[in-house]
Amino acid sequence: MASSSGTMKRSFTSVSILPDNSNQQDAIRIFKIDPEKGKMIFYEDPLKLLLKNSKIKKYKVCVISVNGSYRTGKSFLLNFFLHFLKKKCQSVEQEWMDVNDTLTREFYWRKSWQRVTDGILICPEIFLTETKEGEKIAIILMDTQGTSDHQTSYDEGTKIFALSALISSVHIYNIQNRLDFEQLGVLQLFTGYGAMFSDSEKKPFQDLVILIRDWVNHEAYGFGFEGGENLLISTFKEHEKSNSREIQKTIRDNFANVQCFLMPRPGSKVETKEFKGDFNKIKKIFRDHVKTFVENILTPENLVPKKINNKFVTVEELFEFIRGYWSCINEKDELCIESVYMTAIKISLQDLVNGKVEEYKKRLGSCTDQTQANDEKSEILKEFENEREMKLGSKELLESFKKQLAETLDKMYDDFRVLFNHENQLKKDYFTVVKECKTAEEAQEMIKTRLEIFEKENLNCNRELRDLFKQRLNATLDKMYDDFCVLFNHGNQLKDDYSTVVKECKSVEEAQEMIKTRLEIFEKENVNCNRELRDHFKQRLNATLDKMYDDFCVLFNHGNQLKDDYSTVVKECKSVEEAQEMIKTRLEIFEKENVNCNRELGDHFKQRLNATLDKKYDGFCVLFNHGNQLKDDYSTVVKECKSVEEAQEMIKTRLEIFEKENVNCNRELGDHFKQRLNATLDKMYNDFCVLFNHGNQLKDDYSTVVKECKSVEEAQEMIKTRLEIFEKENVNCNRELRDHFRQRLKETLDKMYDDFCVLFNHGNQLKKDYSIVIKECKTVAEAQEMIKTKLEIFEKENVNCNRELRDHFKQRLNATLDKMYDDFCVLFNHGKQLKDDYSTVVKECKSVEEAQEMIKTRLEIFEKENVHCNRELGDHFKQHLNATLDKKYDDFCVLFNHGNQLKDDYSTVVKECKSVEEAQEMIKTRLEIFEKENVNCNRELRDHSKQRLKETLDKMYDDFCVLFNHENQLKKDYSTVVKECKTIEEAQEMIKTRLEIFEKENVNCNRELRDHFKQRLNATLDKKYDDFCVLFNHGNQLKKDYSTVVKECKTIEEAQEMIKTRLEIFEKENVNCNMELRDHFKQRLNATLDKKYDDFCVLFNHGNQLKDDYSTVVKECKSVEEAQEMIKTRLEIFEKENMNCNRELRDHFKQRLKEGLKNVYNDFFILFNHVNQLTEEYCESIKKYKTSLEASQGVKEICSIYENDSTYCKNKFRNHFKKRLNVFLSDVLEKFRMTDYLKKQYSMLINECSTLKEADEKLERILLEFERNNLNCEDELRNTLKIHLMEECFKIYKRSKEKIEMKHVDYVSNNIEHWAGTSLGVLGAVAGGVVGGPIMSLVLFGAGKSVGGGLGLISRGVGAFAVKLRNYNNEAEEE
Ligand SMILES: Nc1nc2c(ncn2[C@@H]2O[C@H](COP(=O)(O)OP(=O)(O)OP(=O)(O)O)[C@@H](O)[C@H]2O)c(=O)[nH]1
Ligand SMILES: [Mg+2]
């Protein structure tokens, strides 16, 4: 085993079958011995769950087991291994043997003399680390049941040893103190047995570590492996002469590697029961050596992987082997070993098959056709048959594996075919579709789709093979995709290039030539691409370029045609915009008609066309603008011409200028424009002539019609009309010229219009002036004179205006003023008549609003009847009428309001009147005040109002009388009924009722007055109600107070006295309340308290009576429970009999009674228990009394104790219990005497016995007698007495025994000889049979018999000696 120093860098992890959150990681049992059948029980499920765990099952495994004698610290040691692994899982670097740690008990250990571990257990946590080769390895820890204890037979021990040695890769054989021949012999026996179940050709087991615990001889051999090794050598040497050689051979032959380790003692603290596993209580030397030991075994570099038949075993295979070993060992069936062997062969064969399948898979990856795949299959099968493993098993087994391989290969070949075909099909398919792809992404996507299809459709094929083909397919398609990308991009690039250069071609032939060049380049540069794909793309390119060439031809020709066309049509354009527009049109036509051509090319040619047409357009603009400028110039100067001839001359001059200045322009276009100018100027001249004549005619016409206009607007309008006629009739003339002549006409007409306005406005102003002054006229004559004055002013002030127009307007003014004068007369008279009428009707009005309303009506009549009169005049007269009526209305308001105020005032003061006479007097006073204070008002109106006031006050007075009387009556009534109220709410309610009656019966009275009286009534009743409340509550409070205090009264007189006190308090404290009411309530209080007092008397007396009664009866109780029960009964009686008394009082007295009874009970309890305790004490001490005399002395002592103790107890029950104690003790004493008697009886009987059996029978009889006599005796006492009796009898028995016993010594000795000889002989034979077969069995049987004979002799001697010794002892004891 390599050293552990400097290694330990590899990490550890763990896997468990327990849930993650489980703290309980106790070892799980996988085997247990069934003591009845002597077989091993296998707990298969948990082991399977653990070893078939997918996280570990494929890894190699190292199993460490500890085996050996029981109680030698095996489990204890294993927990150090576990501690190491757990710590390393946390961190590889950390020190795992830390003094502050505690040793856990996953492998349960404890200080005890009995066996602890039962069966075989493993840790449910499996640890993972890496070997030095970097391979994962699982570590399993295994604990075993100790051997050599009293419960475990040799057979069971060997089974446990064999199983653990077969399963483990490191087997620790744990022994204590020393390594001697005996222990090595046991190891040899166990090893031999275990090896029977291994079919290995070489060594059946792997590493053996003999671990010697508590090694003390360290001066000779030091601790650790080295000392162990030396000890091992010298031990074997020492026993050379004996059969040690045999032992050594067995061990060395069966274990691949044997080591020995000497371990020091852990220290005395560890060996105590108190030890809980604290590292710091373990001696350092022990800790250090455990550290060396554990690290040596668990260091990843040193880990020993489990091998069977020289082949590494995985975790899951280990499970199968364990099962195999178990069934073999259990059946002790060596044939079964075959099955373990078979398991190993099967595993090897399975590995071989798996290897071949893998190989075939690999080869299929490079197969290019089905035949090749088929050939490879045959080849593999042939190779398989030639393998070494194919010579190991039976023919059938080999055939079955061969079949399995053939089937798997066939399946794989089938899968190959499917995948191969599908691969080809998808390749072909991709090649077809990729040609049509428009982008590289599309082509890429198609690869993805095909791969997915391949995956999906071949789901049932072998996954790895499928992946291989998928990869192959992917590579092929990728290659195709690359070619596609190259061709696709080059094609696009050449297309772009052609589209650039073709634009510059000057002829269609040149464009054609360029296509040819590009196709040649494409062919040449992509010569390495897939030819078919290249041809496809070349064709595609050709087609694209041809299309571009066609477009070129179309656009080239159409452009030329449109250029020619424009030159023709531009001459006819009327404006530069039109010429411009024509360019636009042609460009649009070009655009539209060539819409199907290549857009870029189309744009290029369109631009070219645009440039050519723009050039032509510029020439047009120069000629066109000069022509226009000359036209404008003519139109300006012609306006100022004074005759038609002058206008004619000016045309000629302008044509000459045009000719001269544009001599450089395109001649055809120039001539065309000169002709156009001439025509335009001629047209302008004709217009001049027409406008000049029409203006003169319209001026004459206006001066005639303006006189008849009714407003300045109309005159203005006529100007507008004439201008419009001018405009309209000359619409065809040159616009500018026409505007000029129109302006000239407008100015002439405007002058005429101004005169019209002056006259017209002055007439209107005079009219307005007259309408103002006429309103102030006091007579109709005055109004007539004013008309004359206004006409004279008009004549004078407009002397400068057109005379004809002025006369016409004066006549019109005269007629208007006459009409206004007539209206004045009508309105003046009607106003006067309406004023008189109002004075009459206002007296009867009921409110100021009504009086006001009447004014409104009159004004409306005035308005309506004079609607035809001049509105302004009408308004003036209406206003005047309004002012007169308002004055009258004011007087009415003063009187009306004063009347109302006095009425309100009366209604206020009358409420406070104390009598009806006082109310009458107040009416008179108010009428006098009204007369006096309104002396200035219209008299007729005042008298009328006074009468109205009087009537109102009289009505109010009547209501007062009714309410006043009713109030008094209800007050009286309430005083009577309130006394009988039971609650304050009732008293309150009565107030409410009375108020409602008052309200209801006086519903017809003045509401305000009624509310007043109701309120007054309410206040009076409330006062009475308050008194009621005070008395009512005080009464209740005193009642309650009495209920509280009465409970504490000690006598009935005291309770009586308390009633008197409370009545006096009531009288004194409520002296201010209504006397009648107070007396009433006092009486009521008295009655209530008397009732309570009666209840008090009843309960008080009954309680006392029950207490006395209890004191009497309790003494006789047999138990505290009975006494307790009696309390309960009395309380129930008290409750039941006083059911009708006040509940609160009753509860109170019940509680008082309960306490009283409890006190009595406590007294009882103390003495009762004291007596009981003394009797118990006596019963206990009875055990030590030897004679009745002693027992009787005991009674006296107990009695005196009671006497002494109870002196301090001032209890009335003392004597009673003293008597009781006496009775009991006497009874016990009697029973003791009877027992004493029985003892003596036995003493006599035993003397007659000749055998021990007889002595037993006598004893039985005595005990029966005892039972019979104590039938009614209490159990405990009876048992005490019985034990006492038995002990005494036993002493007697012992004394008499020797005589009886000596007769049987011979008989017993003979029996031992026979029994021991046979048993040992059989035992020897069985052991011999197991280890060495029938001959060994016979030898051991003979040896057993002779040892048995020896034992028979020895036992005879020992028997006699034992009897002597016992007698000697008895004598010594008796002395
Ligand atoms: N003297 C001595 N006592 C030890 C040693 N190791 C452990 N012990 C003590 O021995 C007691 C028993 O230890 P276990 O581990 O339960 O012993 P075991 O061999 O598993 O016992 P079984 O399961 O009954 O076979 C423990 O309580 C420890 O206190 C040791 O090396 N020397
Ligand atoms: Mg144990």
Image (spheres, rainbow, N blue to C red):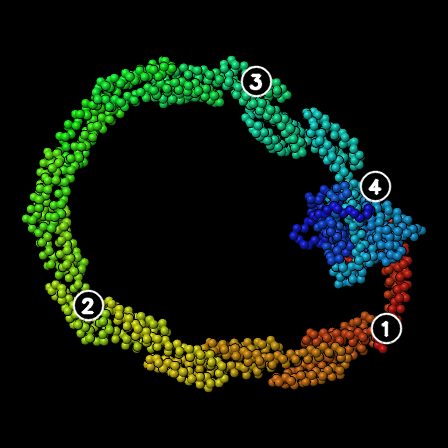
Q: Camera-side residue: 1071 or 388?
A: 1071
Q: Secondary structure at mark 2?
A: helix
Foreground mark, 4 or 2, reads: 2
Residue 1183: % across, % down: 74, 77
Q: Which of pointers 1 and 4 lies earlier in the amino acid sequence?
A: 4
Numbered badge on residue 201: 4
Q: Which residue is mark 3?
A: 518
Image quadrant assignment for residue 1260: bottom right
Q: Is residue 795 visible?
A: yes
Residue 111: % across, % down: 77, 61
Q: Which residue is mark 2?
A: 902
Check disc 2: other Cα within 10 Å, few if <14, some if 14-19, many if 20+: some
Foreground mark, 1 or 3, reads: 3
Q: Secondary structure at mark 1?
A: helix
Q: Is residue 547 visible?
A: no
Q: Which of pointers 1 and 3 lies earlier in the amino acid sequence?
A: 3
Residue 575: % across, % down: 34, 21
Which residue is located at x 15 percent, y 52 percent? 879
Which residue is located at x 79 percent, y 71 percent? 1256
Q: Which of pointers 4 and 3 lies earlier in the amino acid sequence?
A: 4
Q: Which of pointers 2 and 1 lies earlier in the amino acid sequence?
A: 2
Q: Which residue is mark 1?
A: 1369
Residue 765: % across, % down: 14, 42
Picture layout, residue 258 above or below residue 618: below
Q: Secondary structure at mark 4?
A: loop
Q: What is the tally of numbered marks visible in this picture?
A: 4
Q: Which of pointers 2 and 3 lies earlier in the amino acid sequence?
A: 3
Do the residues bearing badges 4 and 3 touch, measured as CB atoms within 8 Å?
A: no
Q: Quadrant of the C terminus?
A: bottom right
Check disc 3: other Cα within 10 Å, few if <14, some if 14-19, many if 20+: many
Picture quadrant of ligand 1: bottom right
